[in-house]
Amino acid sequence: MANARHILWLYEELPALVREGLLSEEQAAALRARYGKVESVSRASIIIVLFSVLAAALIASGIILLLASNWDQLGRGTRAALSFAPLAIGQALAAFTLWQRRDSVAWREGSGILLAGAIGASIALIGQTYNVPGDPQAFLLTWIVLGMPLVYLLNATTVALAGMAATVSWALGQRWQSEETAYFFWAYLLFVLPHVYMAWRSDRAGARFQLLGWGLCLMLLFLPVALPYRHSGLWLLVYSALGSAGVLLGVSPWAGRWWNAFLFIGGGGTALLSLIFSFSGFWTSGILDKSELISVSGEWLMALPLLALPGALLLIRRAERDPLVMLWAALPLLTYPTYVLAAAQFSPGIITFVYNLFAFALGVATLVTGARRGSLGQANIGMALVSMLAILRFFDSDFGFLLRGVVFILVGAGFLVVNLYLSRRNKRAEAAA
Amino acid sequence: MIRGKIAIAVFALMAFAQWVVPGSMILQHERTLTQGEEWKFRCQLLDPYDPFRGRYVMIDVSAGGVDTEGMDLPWSEKVYVSLERDDEGYAKYGAVSTEQPADGAYLLAQVYGSQVVFPLNRFYMQEDIAPEAERVYFDATRSEELRAYVTVRILDGHAVLEQLYIDDTPVADYVRAQGS
């Protein structure tokens, strides 16, 4: 499926192609029929959508606050009846949108978020009228579930994003309060994926998919909260697999734009993890309870598809041959075996050496490739990684002040030299062009 | 996006569920309030704030103590606390059990370590009165013995907090009388 931007470009080109005799009128019409109508999104309409969502969210919050003020002059019966009022208004607007304004993104998103807010207002008012004990978990879960159909009914991305945020806060509460596994986190993830896929199919470079990408990545950052508590070491495998998958997805044309959530969070996460794993303290401290490291159980099944994700992505996209990308995606190749080694009480010295080497290689390779390709940003990312590693190691170990001072000066000087070299080179290239 | 007849069906189902959930909450609470047995619990007051549901007075009815010693219950375990009445007619806590008592009134509570948390911890009030109520209560308890209690209706273990009394007066009336 081609993306809407490309189709629009094609349609703009068609008249010229016909004029130049490259295509006949019939062929141009056939092409238009082949690719269909494109919902063109202008800047003005995006602003209208943003304002309608903002207005609906403000009105919904206003209703909640209004009801929260609590009028004790009103009897119980009146207040019970009143708690259905926002619901009725929200549903009426959603129904109107569904049958009269189906093609308007502003109406769909706006009425969706308004009704979603109204559900919360209604449950909250009942809680207040009857002095229902404060159980934010049950309140949130009811709210999310009752609002979920709106995501597909109105194709409302803002409702999907709000649901993600609410699900994360519910899962955190679940872990905090009752130490129960937050299975609903997984349910919501599965529920929202088709919506993400549909947004991707209609326009992968568009705001809708890009926003959902950020939402999805941020939600996945909290995934270990939804893993069973017993496996205190499982998160390290899951995070490294997700980081690797994020990098592979982020550099592929699937991501829509070159600068995207998958690359940013996947790459950032990979860098952060390799730095964390380079501490010997990490492998010896109580963060990893070795007795729990290897205890195969049914809960592993939940994590297994995620652990296999980077491998699956590589299989599907065999074209990926950029060595730098492969290196960034290689972290799971280290974490999977070291997880087992750490469980077998293997020397932490060797494990941390391997991660130091990996982080260093990652930094240097990014720096060198960036320099060769003339990309100042990439070179600086590599440089930052190398210097972070140097700084961490020198706070970590017992080296003298003199040595530490010299190394810091060298790292700083390195930064300057690389930047100077690259900006000179870029200027020269511009002058030559 | 869902279209056509399916959209109508999904919308109808969703709208129905959105009415049924709050509706059944109302029915359940109304049933307990009208048919439930009335109990009085001595309590203490604190004043917090809920961003969604507004001002409430936080209530602690656990004073007098629930004995869970030696039970070694798991974190957040649900327990049944059976109720008795003391000489003055206030509720008093009896036996704690993980199984539902066969007869008599009881409350469902949750155990967090040595703490027993009852589902009677909030009394919602008009926003200008709640902080006043706590202040009045606080001032009064320093000078004299002031009784605060809540009336609770209980039906088959489902408890609904009905009214908060300070010195035998509903709290809102008490605060208004103090202010004037």
Image (cartoon, rainbow, N blue to C red):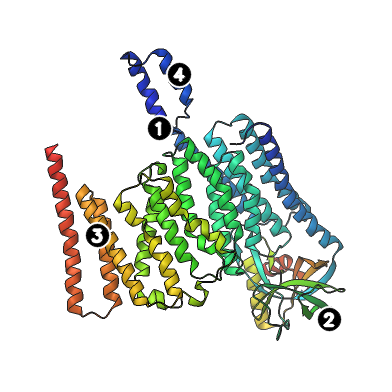
Circles 1 and 2, Cβ within 8 Å, touching? The answer is: no
Marks 1 and 3 belong to one chain: yes
* Mark sitting on residue A364: 3
**Of residues A407 and A147, which is closer to you in this image?**
A407
| Parent chain of label 2 | B
**Which residue matches tag 4?**
A30
Tag 1 secondary structure: helix
Q: Which residue is mark 2?
A: B88
Q: Is residue A364 visible?
A: yes
Q: CA distance from mark 4 to mark 2?
A: 90 Å
Distance of mark 1 from mark 3, alpha carbons? 37 Å
Asked if the residue under mark 3 is in contact with the one under mark 2, i.e. CB atoms within 8 Å, the reply is no
Which quarter of the rendering shows the C terminus of chain A?
Answer: top left
* Distance from the alpha carbon under mark 4 to that under mark 1: 19 Å
Asked if badges 4 and 3 are on one and the same chain, I answer: yes
Residue drawn at point x = 48 percent, y = 76 percent:
A290
Asked whether the residues under marks 2 and 3 belong to the same chain, the reply is no
Give the left or right position of residue A382, taking residue B75 as reference: left
Which one is in front, A216 or B104?
A216
Instruction: Tell me if A325 is positioned left or right of B137 in this view.
Output: left
Please report whichever mark, 4 or 3, sits nearer to the chain's N-terminal start. Answer: 4
Q: Is residue A67 visible?
A: no
Question: What residue is shown with label 1?
Answer: A5
How far is mark 2 from mark 3, CA to CA?
Answer: 79 Å
In the image, is residue B145 above or below residue A50?
below
